[in-house]
Amino acid sequence: MLDRAAYDRYLTAFNARDYDKVADFYVDPPRMEFFGIVITSRQELKDFYAWLHDNVDEHVRVLNFAAGETCTAIDAIVRITAKKDLTREALDAKGATGFFPITAGESQEIRQFIFYTTRGGLIEKVECALPPPLDASA
């Protein structure tokens, strides 16, 4: 089980950009699919996050947490601040078709639901979803 204490260690490594330690939380090979990105190896995982964090600062704040033997679910706010411009064309070229374009210096806060399928306490698969936007007229 990926319990809260283990997840907090994972998130600490993630927020510190310690990609080797982050990868240690995954089965080998990992399977991640989110916003157009597909990761199927430990090296792809490290390469993707190195690319992403070369372009943006990213910080994950957990709002809600639930864990069972085969699944850990997170309701989180992900704050992205661009170090460089990421245009629609640049994101699409990287395969990040579900990411939002952002200009250098701009910040975005995105609520995400992140689902981790686990096996033996390690992350086997990651899936992310965004809630629908709130109706401003309601």
Image: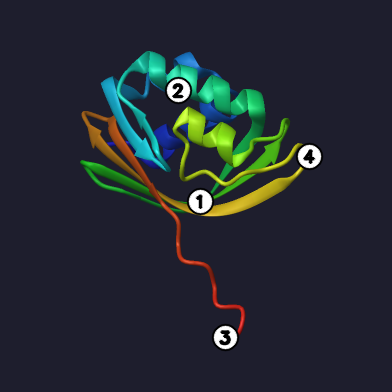
Label 4 or label 3, whichever comes before in sequence order? 4
Q: Position of residue 83 (x, y in %)?
A: 73, 31
SS category of the residue bearing label 4 = loop
Q: Is residue 70 left or right of residue 47?
A: left
Q: Position of residue 30 (x, y in %)?
A: 29, 25
Please identify, in this view, whether the residue under mark 3 or under mark 1 is nearer the observer.
3
Label 3 or label 1, whichever comes before in sequence order? 1
Q: Residue furthest bottom?
A: 138
- State if disc 1 and disc 2 touch (CB < 8 Å): no
Q: Which residue is mark 4?
A: 105
Q: Position of residue 70 (x, y in %)?
A: 21, 41
Residue 121 in which image quadrant? top left
The front one of 53 and 120 is 53
* Separation of residues labelled 4 and 1 (CA atoms): 22 Å
Q: Is residue 77 left or right of residue 75?
A: right
Residue 17 higher or lower than 134, as above or below: above
Q: Which residue is mark 1?
A: 76
**Mark 3, residues whose alpha carbon is within 10 Å: few (<14), some, or many (≥20)?**
few
Task: Say which residue appears at 57% left-offset and 86% top-offset.
Answer: 138
Q: Position of residue 38 (x, y in %)?
A: 35, 31
Task: Say which residue appears at 48% left-offset and 23% top-offset.
Answer: 48
Q: Which residue is mark 3?
A: 138
**Mark 4, residues whose alpha carbon is within 10 Å: few (<14), some, or many (≥20)?**
few
